[in-house]
Image (tube, rainbow, N blue to C red):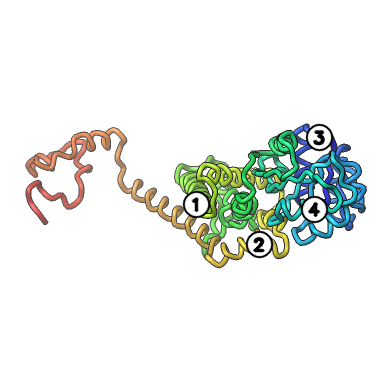
Amino acid sequence: MSVGFIGAGQLAWALAKGFTAAGVLAAHKIMASSPDMDLATVSALRKIGVNLTPHNKETVQHSDVLFLAVKPHIIPFILDEIGADIENRHIVVSCAAGVTINSIEKKLMAFQPTPKVIRCMTNTPVVVREGATVYATGTHAQVEDGRLLEQLMGSVGFCTEVEEDLIDAVTGLSGSGPAYVRTADGWAAAGGGGRTSGHICLSSTLLPAPAALGRASGQPLSGGELAWDSGTFSLQAFTALDALADGGVKMGLPRRLAVRLGAQALLGAAKMLLDSEQHPGQLKDNVCSPGGATIHALHVLESGGFRSLLINAVEASCIRTRELQSMADQEKVSPAAIKKTVLDKVKLDSPPEALLAPSGHSKLLPRNVVPAGKKD
């Protein structure tokens, strides 16, 4: 089996890299075409051994599975160009947002009576084999064609078949989802990977990131630092995932699938960030096509103050953690004493003399104790 990409941009690079890393396809069995052979992604494809050409027809001739990895508005022109070269052996896989199977079939049927077309929506974390992919098969695509694509895409992440009318909702959820995560610079920078190394911008204050705090002193992270690091970010991740899933359900996705795709989008974005030396903002820019679905979604996030909300959430958690630490420092109480106090419930019915009698627990008395049966 050989694979071709019409278009040699970010998606073609991510898929080719993922396929070769997974071992399902050798690099020399992949060909990609682009009119611009000076693109950074073209150089990256060449480095891993992918065959490059400026001619789309050559890519068609040397492939069995043909991915249309170009912007949606270019698809009709591409189909007009390559239609006469499509044969029965070809499986045409469109990755373009908003382009229907029917529109592709109509174009190709002018050249071939039974074109095998599959519509696919995936995302760039396929490059680290943590992508989220759904697909729908066309009128003439066979069951084995879908299984072949699922084998390919399943090697680079989660993949499942859906009805075509759900794919637009998936585009907004997991297709664009990784960019939503990467947009949260304040959140992603919390591990020390932000614009200012080892620091996080919280409102107008520059604070050391948790990782930097530990490195600067040569000491392991304290419980308080870990509390606002892992605890807060886990909460933000769960909250973000819940909201993403709700968005998917609103647009028609079954709840279980929406949660699965949302979780995979978060996982894939995090894995890409950890495996990359690029700033999260750059990773976000890589998936924002001019005038595309993702940049429109990001505009809505920015309008709602998405990054500011996350930054403020980190700040609020950090401040409250320090308040709790301060309270704990003022109340030097042993765990054993706390346990005994909880069990005895301080016995508020005891006479004041007994409560104030010298004992190892006298400092456990609550302030402004109100004797039982009386009101203040």
Of badges 1 and 2, the one in the foreground is: 1
Can you give x and y, in whole percent of width and height, for residue 35 in the image?
89, 57
Assign a secondary structure to mark 1. Answer: helix
Q: With respect to residue 167, does 362 lie above or below?
A: above
Give the mark nearer the N terminus: 1 vs 2.
Answer: 1
Badge 3 amino acid: Leu
Amino acid type, mark 4:
Gly
> Identity of the amino acid at label 1?
Asp
Residue 282 in the image: above or below residue 371: below
How far, Cα to Cα, is label 2 from label 4? 17 Å
Residue occupying the point 81% across, 45% down: 66
Residue position for label 4: 9
Q: Is residue 137 left or right of residue 113?
A: left
Answer yes or no: is residue 351 visible: yes
- The residue lying at 61 percent from left, 57 percent from top is 183
Alpha carbon of mark 3 to alpha carbon of mark 4: how far?
19 Å
Q: Which residue is mark 2?
A: 295
